Structures are given as structure tokens and as C-alpha cells.
Image: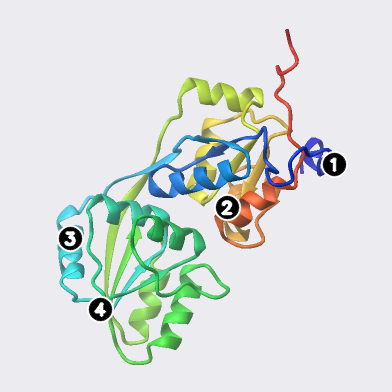
Amino acid sequence: MKADSMHADPHRHDPEKPLAGWRVLVPRGGPWGDGVAASLRTQGAVPVVAPLINFAPTNDITTLESALVDLAEGVFDWLTVTSATTVDVLFAYRAKIPATTRVAAVGETTAAALQAAGYRVDLVPDRDNSAAGMADQLLALEPEPRDILTLRSEIAKPVLTRRLIEAGHRVRSVVAYRTVGVPVTERIAHDVESGRINAILVTSGSVAEQVHLQFPRIPEGTVIAAIGPRTAKDARAAGLDVDVVADRQTVDALIEAVSHFALPHASDEFQP
């Protein structure tokens, strides 16, 4: 823990704007990033949208495009979405999800990304926001064989696909994207190093890796906030000193967790 940022500020001027004066790095762009930025503004913060990761096309675009055509035509009973980046792919392709296809999101972050992009969400695991948790819930809901499309990243372990196939479901597992890092501008890198960015939101293991890689000197006072225990574990494995973990895997819970900290000061804030 970073000692300088451990105590709540007893002198807040506006309890309705608990993050007034804060500059918070939002590590993803697109509809999801826009939504997070809007939520931060309502709390008084200045969001700094600096996408650290993006998706690169799958090496098998033909297979992906064929799956999305079948999705639009109602071939599948279920679509499973295990990351917000998958939502970016759906949005980029203007993918159509018919009313006959139910949509399962791995967690609240992914569900929020789907909704921000205009898609509905039919299932979010109650407790375990992971591929295994999604498999448990789907298997409980669907005892009879169904046609399921699982969209995943190139590096994802096929936990969900394997569980569903073992239970007798007809599963088409398709790589939707490859995750790549996006270099930030020199200005943002400098603002992080100087402490002018007061908090960094960490929303996935891929984001954590990029934070560690691109910001090698994060000041002690900067609040590193992870969106859930799984992300916090990945962040620590990547070498980050996580200050706070949201008690629910939602953006609102993440922002609320940050709001309990005192506003850190930049290293050069009081220099002439």
C-alpha cells in the first residue's frame, strides 16, 4: 500500500463531487471508455482517456466474419462474451445479434460495454466473474444441448469452450482478436510520472501489463485501483502495487473505491 494515499480527506468541499480535483486515467477508449469518463465527471473528476490496449485483427478473419454472419442469421442459441475487447470487435463489425440469441457476459464490466455499444445482456454470473463461473451458470440454465458461439482472444484459455463441449453443447469457438499494446503520448507518460495523474484504473490483466510497461516510475501517491480480485491478482503478478480493489466488479464500484482516498499532489505542484 502507498502510505501517502491511505487516509480519507476530512475536508471535502462538496460531498456530491468526491473526486473534485482528481485526474483519473481511463485505460480504454471506445463506448466503454466514454461511459467511464462520463461517470467520473459526475463525481467531479477530470477523466484522461488514454487507451493502453487495443485489438488487432484475428489471423483468421474469414472464420470470424463467417461466424458473425451466422450469428446475425440466428444460428446460435447463445453468444458468450468474456471481455470488453470482444465488444469492441462486435461494434467494429456492426454485428447483429437477433432476439432469438441470448447473450452472456462474463462480468459487469463486459455487460456495461455491451450495453454501451447498444447490445442487450441476458446473463451475468451471480458470483464468479470468470469463464468457469459463466460455464457453471450456463450449464445450470441449459441442460439440453444448445448451439453456442464463444468469441475469445487469441491468448484466452479455452476453459468455457471445453466445459460446454463436455456437457454436450454444440460450440463454435472463434478467435475474435489479438490484444496489442497502444503507446501513450509523451505528455501522458510525463503526467503519470510527475503525479499529475492522481489515479489509474486497472480493468484487466492486459491493461495491468501495459501500465507496468509504459509507466515504470509511478509516484507513491498515485492510486492504483483494480476492478476486482482477479484483476488485482493479475496486476500484482505484472508488478503493480495495487492500492484498492473494488468490492464489486463494476465501474461504479471502482470509482467509489477511489473516492475514499485523499487527493494526492503532483511532485511539481507547488514549485514556482
Distance in Å between CA atoms under marks 3 and 2: 30 Å
Structural distance between the alpha carbons of marks 4 and 3: 22 Å
Q: Measuring 15% from the left and 72% from the top, which residue is drawn there?
A: 73
Residue type at mark 3: give it: Thr
Measured as percent of width and height from the top left, residue 146 is found at 28, 84
Q: Nearer the viewer, residue 7 or 62?
A: 7
Residue position marked by numbered label 1 in the rendering: 10
Dot 2 surroundings within 10 Å: few (below 14), some, or many (20 or more)? some
38 horizontally vs 178: left or right:
right
> Mark 2 belongs to which amino acid?
Asp
At which x and y percent is residue 52? 45, 38
Of labels 4 and 2, earlier in sequence is 4
Identify the image's colour scheme: rainbow, by chain, secondary structure or one colour: rainbow
Q: Nearer the viewer, mark 4 or mark 3?
A: 4
Query: Which label was assigned to residue 66?
Result: none
User: In the picture, residue 250 is in which quadrant?
Assistant: bottom right
Residue 236 showing in the rendered view: no
Check disc 2 and report the residue beneath it. 234
Q: CA distance from mark 4 to mark 1?
A: 52 Å
Q: Earlier in the sequence, mark 1 or mark 2?
A: 1
Residue type pointed to by label 4: Thr
Residue 63's disc is 3
Find the residue positioned furthest to the bottom: 144
Residue on which the image places disc 4: 100
Q: Secondary structure at mark 1?
A: loop
Do residues under tags 3 and 1 come within 8 Å of each other at their CB atoms? no
